Amino acid sequence: MTMPSHLRIHIENDPTAPSLMVEEQALRQRLNGITGVSAAISINNTGQSEPVGHDADILLACRKMNIAEARAANPNLRFVQTISAGVEAYLDHLPADVSLANASGVHAAKGAEFILCAALMLNFNIPQFVTDKAHCVWAPRFGGTIAGQTILMLGVGSIGSAAARTLRSQGAHVIGVTRSGSPHKDLDELYPVEHLDQLLERADLVVCTLPLTQGTRNLMSAGRLARLKPKCGIINVGRAGVFDYQALEARLRSGELSGAVLDVFPEEPLPISHSLWDCPRLVITPHCCLDDHTTYISACLDIFVENVARFARGQDLINEVDRQAGY
Amino acid sequence: MTMPSHLRIHIENDPTAPSLMVEEQALRQRLNGITGVSAAISINNTGQSEPVGHDADILLACRKMNIAEARAANPNLRFVQTISAGVEAYLDHLPADVSLANASGVHAAKGAEFILCAALMLNFNIPQFVTDKAHCVWAPRFGGTIAGQTILMLGVGSIGSAAARTLRSQGAHVIGVTRSGSPHKDLDELYPVEHLDQLLERADLVVCTLPLTQGTRNLMSAGRLARLKPKCGIINVGRAGVFDYQALEARLRSGELSGAVLDVFPEEPLPISHSLWDCPRLVITPHCCLDDHTTYISACLDIFVENVARFARGQDLINEVDRQAGY
């Protein structure tokens, strides 16, 4: 990584998300705190692909964009910071000598709270009661508390581990799978993803926080969904492509699954014609339950400013994406 | 209170609630643990009003019943134990020399967990998203966590205080009203109920665990509901009569309230013709979310067996109902 004496930073904002737009002045003030770094900042608030800066070293991408095109317009571009955790939209066109860092970790506090909310909803049969209400059906169910239930985490990143801590504080038994399966202090049991089939048979509830990568696409296939216990519940706050949503919908309609709380979908916004809208035992949250806009950009700028300092000093970035792993 | 050498205990079961029926043999085994007490047990599993024992000293009422009639059939009757926490159905016909004890406390663990669930649901706008789904509407809302929100507890009994502890562990600021307003270790602030009007203006969320008494009936009148902040949420796990449900429904329909999670209703089961069934921003749970049938009867028998021992020794009962206060 080169070490420029003077950094040129370009911000690409998304004007359709006003609460997530970075202000040039706010960034300038925070960058002033970095010793020995001077920065020229350019900004595009139009959401249009042109201009994407012209001589930037660093790009702060607040909207989805083609990094190869940005690089063509900015030959010196060496580092792109996103304000999203998932980066599958950026990886397809990422030049070999451009580093990419994501906003992983920003979602941990709200994400853990939402997963707790969704897990309790499934324990209390809320998706079933919502469906019952639509049909004027009064059908009490007298289950127990979440203590003693077995919750299977697919992925244990910053959100998953924060959620595991919260769920264990309520008494749940939390197991999980990751690529390595190395033990994790926040989980009761952790296994390599190759052990998934056997674990599915133990889960009362499955929680997915996985990014979409070659290794996670269709991980929860129709065959794996069929291995779940009757009346298992599903929470997905990762990416829709990790599941076979057609098979998932069929199991919600049949009642084999007790319910699902889904925050992510194959197409977003979910088209009005999509069959999931009237799927029973399903609670839809429109891809918003991990994002706390009251603190979001501030937390993203914490990561970005730290990374600008590291870039200037030639140090490893935090949250740098492993382009092979895809996250 | 007399101190019989030999106790005659009658159990009135409710055959429509099989998981809540007390078995004579199970009770006999537990009573054998009380030193110096011998008991003759009679039981009625028919759910019919006749026979209600004939010479019982003690009645274990597992169904709603007229205590005056039970007393007429059992002249020695001096103590009635219920397996419900709410006792308004028993108080109208309670002879002056019969003590009544309820099952207060049995619901604390599951009740606190359900109130946490409902509070998180309201924080995450779940009632709104459920309504949006019914209309195929994709409308993200990017709020924060429950930390820093102000939650107003109406009543701080065993459920309310357990819920307050849980909500504070998530960072919420928990205030409340009781008859006395005496400070309580589990709440940030506690006031006499006469201060309610001012507190309503501070609440992001109102949680009612109150029993129905002369002092609580219509406490949350139309006028008090009108004092709530816009987008306040409502949780009621106490009794429906504490609220003006018509005014509550109107405020849910208009969107002045962000949503409600109601477990109790003016008539149960809620009649199929009732307008609440299609009220937007409302989650209905059919009066079942505090009752953990996996542990319920065992916990009730803990109270009852302790009370039988106290009755035999002429000691004060636990959970004895104050017939003036109504709980």
Image (cartoon, coloured by chain):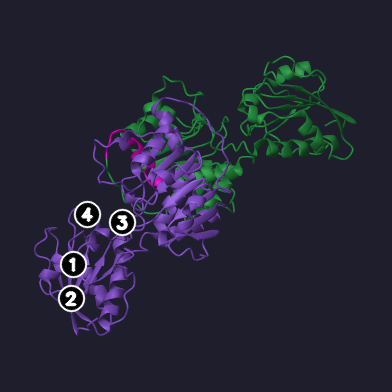
Chain colours: A green, B purple
Confirm whether circles 2 and 1 share one chain: yes
Range of the magenta residues? A122-137
* Residue B120 is inside the magenta segment: no
CA gap between label 3 and label 4 equals 10 Å
Q: What residue is disc 3 on?
A: B293
Where is residue A232 drawn, in percent x and y? 38, 43
Which secondary structure lies at badge 1?
Answer: strand
Q: Is residue A13 left or right of residue B74?
A: right
Q: Quadrant of residue A9?
A: top right
Mark 2 or 1, which is nearer the eye? 2
Report whether residue A172 is seen: no
Q: Are marks 3 and 2 in contact (CB under 8 Å)?
A: no
Disc nearer the start of the sequence (1/3)? 1
Q: Crowding near pointer 2: few (<14 within 10 Å), some, many (20+)? A: many
Q: Are marks 4 and 2 on the same chain?
A: yes
Task: Confirm or deny contact between disc 4 and disc 1 (CB under 8 A).
Answer: no
Q: Nearer the viewer, mark 3 or mark 2?
A: 2
> Chain for mark 1?
B
Residue bearing mark 4: B17
**Identity of the residue drawn at 17% across and 62% down:** B66
Foreground mark, 4 or 2, reads 2
User: How crowded is the residue under tag 3: few (<14 C-alpha within 10 Å), some, or many (20+)?
Assistant: some
Is residue A131 found inside the magenta-colored segment of the image?
yes
Q: CA distance from mark 1 to mark 3?
A: 19 Å
- The residue beneath circle 2 is B57
Labels 3, 2: one chain: yes
Q: Sequence-wise, which precedes: disc 4 or disc 1? A: 1
